[in-house]
Image: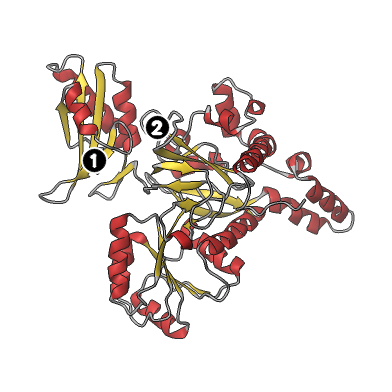
Amino acid sequence: MAKAAWDRQSEKAVVSMQNELLREQIRDSIAPFSPLWRRRFAELNRKPSMVKTIEDLAAIPAMGERDVSPSGDPIGMSALVLQAGEAGYTLHGKGPEIRKAMRVRATNKDAYRRIVDSDTRATSYVFTGHGFRYPIASTRNDLDVIARAGARLWSVLGLTSNDVLLSALPPGATTDHVALQYAATAAGAPALFPGADAASLQDAIRLAPPTVLAVATSTAPQILSELADLGSLRTLLLVGAPTDAERIAAAHGLSRCGAPSNTVILGVHAPVGARVLWGECRQSAGATGYHTYPDLEIIQVVDPDSGEATPGMGELVLTQLEMRGSALLRWRTGDTVSAIAMAPCPSCGRSVPRATGLRRAAMFANLESGKSLDLRSIAGVMSSRPAVRDWRLVVGRRGRDGAMSTVIHYDAINPDDPATAIAVATDIRHVTGTLPTQLVAATRDELATLSGTPVSARILVG
């Protein structure tokens, strides 16, 4: 019986496949080649071999960049890179590749070295991160995986080799730019990457009228306002999980630059730490969430406050499969989702896990200083104070000046004791480098009223 396509397997088959790939990833990559994870498994008093299923994986505490490099020094993130080599390749490589390498070795040592290096040597890097920028490594074989995912993305977006891509993303070593390049290459589609300069983009439009325009979600209205003659356009890709308001702003921009009225707006997104882009299917026009690649990653959800596994809404956690550059296992992305949908997409029919209600970097707030405030760090402080019984963190922009505001409402055992507020403020400044805008003593009823329908029970992002 022929094997079902990557996006047409039953939910049972997807789970079975992911369990098998997870065991392989831990046995042949994480356990032998990651000193970071060897230490972490020892601290958890667990053996890597104990993680056999997705359920077992969910029992491992999720981790993020500050767990690897508490100081925020990008150098510390080198601990994520797998320390593989020739000896490890012969022990943990895939059988067909090892047999091919051994045949080649007898006659051509240089060719043998290239085969080994393709699987074990980190040669390419992209930079990612919210709180601070850090590199994620890929081997040569990882790049083949990224290209394969790119071809799938092209299909999910409803594009073909006849489409012409124009990218307004700043060229650079970022997942967004590199993954988009590989997607166009794998699909055999013409692509131009002139950057975000309006004059260069307009020259590219005259040279090769695009059918697809990719632009960063945050800069889409501005860039579209500077372009003209987009009559050939049929798809606008907003890179970075657009909100409803950002989609509307982009649609207004399209109407002013000569794009056809039936141009489809789709979001593509790479969570922090990822090396591939997820996309919304063309049939749904963005209504059914971001389609993932079940043989390349496992996506799960944790409570943003506690970091514990939880069903439904919460922070997105990523585990990468089939890659041997950097090891990302139970990686906290800072994005939030309303749910992980496992049922086939009602629009395109693809039976892949979908991240629905995705909000990019929802666990981070951008301050006027240019720094990013990790809301999870504040949650850690509040949850660790024995004098605080309950709390709510309300994040939003002030109406009078648009400045970012972080207001903490807390229910203390002794609300009249100023020492509680002082201790909380001191700890928050220590872990985040800044003070909250305001600390407000509150009752439990007042905290319950604040909650409403938040992303999480305690962190309320406006």
Label 2 is placed on what type of residue?
Asp
What residue does disc 1 label?
A: 395
Residue 193 percent coordinates (x, y): 47, 72
Q: Where does residue 362 sit, x and y in percent of width and height?
A: 34, 44
Residue plotted at (56% across, 73% down): 189
Q: Nearer the viewer, residue 202 or 128?
A: 202
Q: Is residue 118 left or right of residue 335?
A: right
**Mark found first going from the N terminus, 2 or 1:** 2
Q: Is residue 174 visible?
A: no
Given the image, on which type of amino acid does mark 1 rest? Answer: Val
Badge 1 local density, few (<14 within 10 Å), some, or many (20+)? many
SS class of the residue under badge 1? strand
State the residue in front, 368 or 254.
254
Q: Residue at x 44, y 52 (%)?
A: 288
Please provide percent x and percent y for residue 366.
28, 48
Q: Does 100 sit left or right of 229 as displayed? A: right
Query: Mark on residue 303?
Result: 2
Mark-to-mark CA distance, 2 and 1: 17 Å
Q: Nearer the viewer, residue 203 or 391?
A: 391
Query: Which quadrant of the view contains residue 123?
Result: bottom right
Q: Which is in the foreground here, disc 2 or disc 1?
A: 2
Residue 69 in the image: state x and y as whole percent: 45, 37
| Front one among 190 and 313 | 313
| Secondary structure of residue under mark 2 | loop
Most distant residue in the right direction? 106
* Number of residue marks: 2
Q: Could you tell me which residue is drawn at 52 percent across and 58 percent down? A: 348
Residue 365 seen in the figure = yes
Farthest residue toward the bottom?
206
Q: Is 199 located above or below residue 251 in the figure?
A: below
